Amino acid sequence: MDHAEATTRLLDAAERLFYARGVQAVGMDEIRGASGVSLKRLYQCFPSKEELVVGYLRRRDLRWNAALAESVARTEDPVERLNAVFDWLREWFTEPGFRGCAFLNTFGELGEAPAIGAAVRAHKEALRTYLDGLVEDAGMPESLTDQLYLLVEGAIVTAAVTGNPDAAEQAKAVVAALLNH
Amino acid sequence: MDHAEATTRLLDAAERLFYARGVQAVGMDEIRGASGVSLKRLYQCFPSKEELVVGYLRRRDLRWNAALAESVARTEDPVERLNAVFDWLREWFTEPGFRGCAFLNTFGELGEAPAIGAAVRAHKEALRTYLDGLVEDAGMPESLTDQLYLLVEGAIVTAAVTGNPDAAEQAKAVVAALLNH
DNA sequence: TAGAGTAGAGAACGTACGTTCTCAACACCA
DNA sequence: TGGTGTTGAGAACGTACGTTCTCTACTCTA
């Protein structure tokens, strides 16, 4: 097992465990057991738990954004794509093990740590930038971006707390009102 | 110092410390020091840390709801009251030490614990019920409640992560569109 | 005032965790 | 093949924390 595969395995285990149970509830020894990577190697790949958490967030950021973009891109009409965002959210909400936004959860837990806060903000900024592109392609006023963003965040949080994926449809209804306005 | 005052002091210290730094980052000994209540008494009032956390959430729920309702009630017009919700949110966002929703933060940290999850859901349900009353008083269709709720959650989360209170105004703009629709 | 119950201060206990260290096994290369 | 460097397994270390225990001092009552 080389360095790259060890890193992948560690991130796989970290993502699964951290997302499901929170960062502080999962020890480095459990990451070692779940990944099959020795503690020595673990600390070679990630010199501290905080760096492993940042690595986890960074990779999840890339994956999450890519999954959203890929799903939305299957819709042709640029205006309809704004709705497609919430269709994808609904799919995500119904996935087994959905526990809300990994970034918000980690932020609530470790927001003090500057590296964590930076990773969370980077993720949210990337989302906002992506939405901005969709709004521009749809020929809508720029002010719609922040409003869409609020609805996405609200839907994620609500679905996480209530366990009910209908928040996606409710947000979509608001989008429809904004577009018709 | 009697039992009631000890309880109050403990909840005061717990609320300040837990909200500012998270639950897991604050030890029982620090609560003792900040409250001036002995460990023995602490464990008489709250037999475990989890019960102290639940007590903290419950009292914060009452206070937060009351502050919102009191501020909104100063507005006479029932329709205008829907906007007043977001005016109050903006005030909250600009308070020193604002760190987002205590309930969401705790949920992200300890959502597994059933008692915590229940306290969080109770708070969110109370908020939704309150919004439902405002919507009814304003003579608006019931479907507006969930939409308002999404906007409130989205604004809180966004203000917390970005540190920018403008999320309140952005949400308000969406409300205006929904009302004009 | 004597005694019984209680409170406070803080030591103590058990556990868990992040991180480092030890040591035996093994791979690679001269 | 012999020696050197690296690896993995897991023990060890230091710390922190939730919770309980000890002991002293005080307070109330008979």
Image (cartoon, coloured by chain):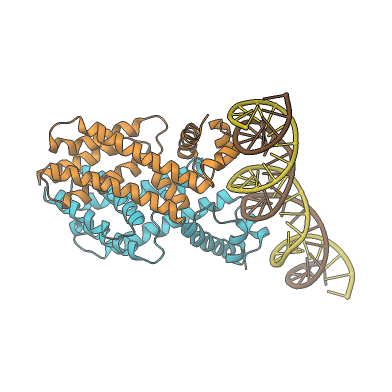
Chain colours: A orange, B cyan, C yellow, D brown
Q: Residue at x 53, y 63 (%)?
A: B13
Residue B145, x across and y down, in percent: 25, 46
Residue A41 in the image: x percent, y percent? Answer: 57, 38
Q: Quadrant of residue B32?
A: bottom right
Residue B10 shown left or right of residue A172 in the figure: right
Residue B44 in the image, given as x and y percentages of width and height: 64, 55
Q: Decide if residue A27 is in sight here.
A: no
Asked if residue D18 is positioned above or below residue D2 in the image, the reply reads below
Relative side of A52 to B152, left or right: right
Which residue appears at 32% of the width and 59% of the height? Answer: B69
Report which quarter residue B92 is drawn in: bottom left
Height in image: A147 above or below A77?
A: below
- Answer above or below: position of A60 versus B46: above
- Residue A20 in the image: state x and y as whole percent: 47, 37
User: In the drawing, does residue A83 fall left or right of residue C30?
Assistant: left
Using the rendered image of the protein, determine whether residue A66 is visible from the camera's viewpoint.
yes
Above or below — where is C8 with respect to A78? below
Between residue A82 and residue A68, name the one nearer to us: A68
Q: How many marks?
A: 0
